[in-house]
Image: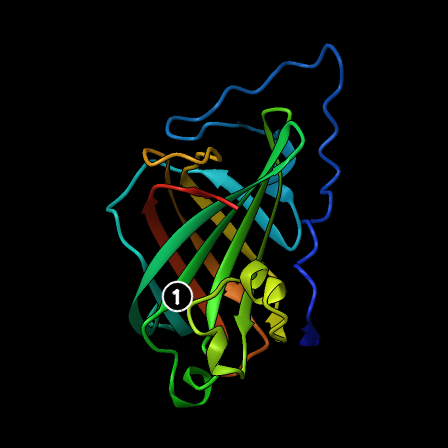
Amino acid sequence: PAVAASTAPAAPPAEHGGIKKAGAPKPKPAPGIRAKLLRESRTWKPLSLRAVPAGAAVTKVERRLEKVKGRYRGTTTSARAIARVHREGPNRLLVVSVFPRTLGALLDRRHPHFELRFRVDEGYLDAVTAALVTVSDPRGAGLDSDELAARGIPYETDTPASGEVLLSALDARASRSAVNAGILRHASFASPGVGLADVWWSVRGARAR
């Protein structure tokens, strides 16, 4: 997808057509996930979503994945993650930002990070989006897209054309005890420095925004 500059807050994730019909069986929250998952989320495009058992608490990025002898291998770097919660009336938007230690010399000069955005509407997780965010201005280092927009610092986004989100924990509350964890798996980014990538996050605590 084309990379476009933006000076406004990232738009809320688009609807995935998750219609909650009266009388339909209500899905139950998966363990560790404080929201109901829609049955059709397994077939969402461009990012599908499903719950998985909790794994090791890890935050890292593996980029430029290639299949070698039946397994995907790439370049791995450690990372840190932060979580912020935006209240939208009775609904919430959880933004998890993953800041890799390095993505290579060309990208590192643009202070890259990944963002995962989860919208919880009336208790249902009804949308998820992801993006690689880059900024040329050094003042933007360590800031998420909402902070960049609030300070008037231009940034660019690269959204994956395909991929899946494997979610093991989600808590869209502004709380020190909130735990959010998962993997953005086989996400296809246009940036040649990233390409096909896996992004892991495990973060305790979420701040209100």
Q: Nearer the viewer, residue 182 or 171?
A: 171
Write the residue at 54% across / 78% down.
Answer: 135
73 lies left or right of 163? left
Q: Nearer the viewer, residue 139 or 110?
A: 139
Residue occupied by mark 1: 99
Percent position (x, y) of residue 149? 62, 65
| Helix, strand or loop under label 1 | strand
Write the residue at 69% across / 76% down.
Answer: 5
Q: In the rendered view, would you say 9 is above or below 156?
A: above
Write the residue at 54% across / 70% down.
Answer: 133
45 lies left or right of 176? right
Residue 107 visible in rendering: yes
Q: In the rendered view, would you say 186 is above or below 35?
A: below
Write the residue at 33% across / 47% down.
Answer: 203
15 lies left or right of 113? right
Q: Quadrant of residue 87?
A: top right
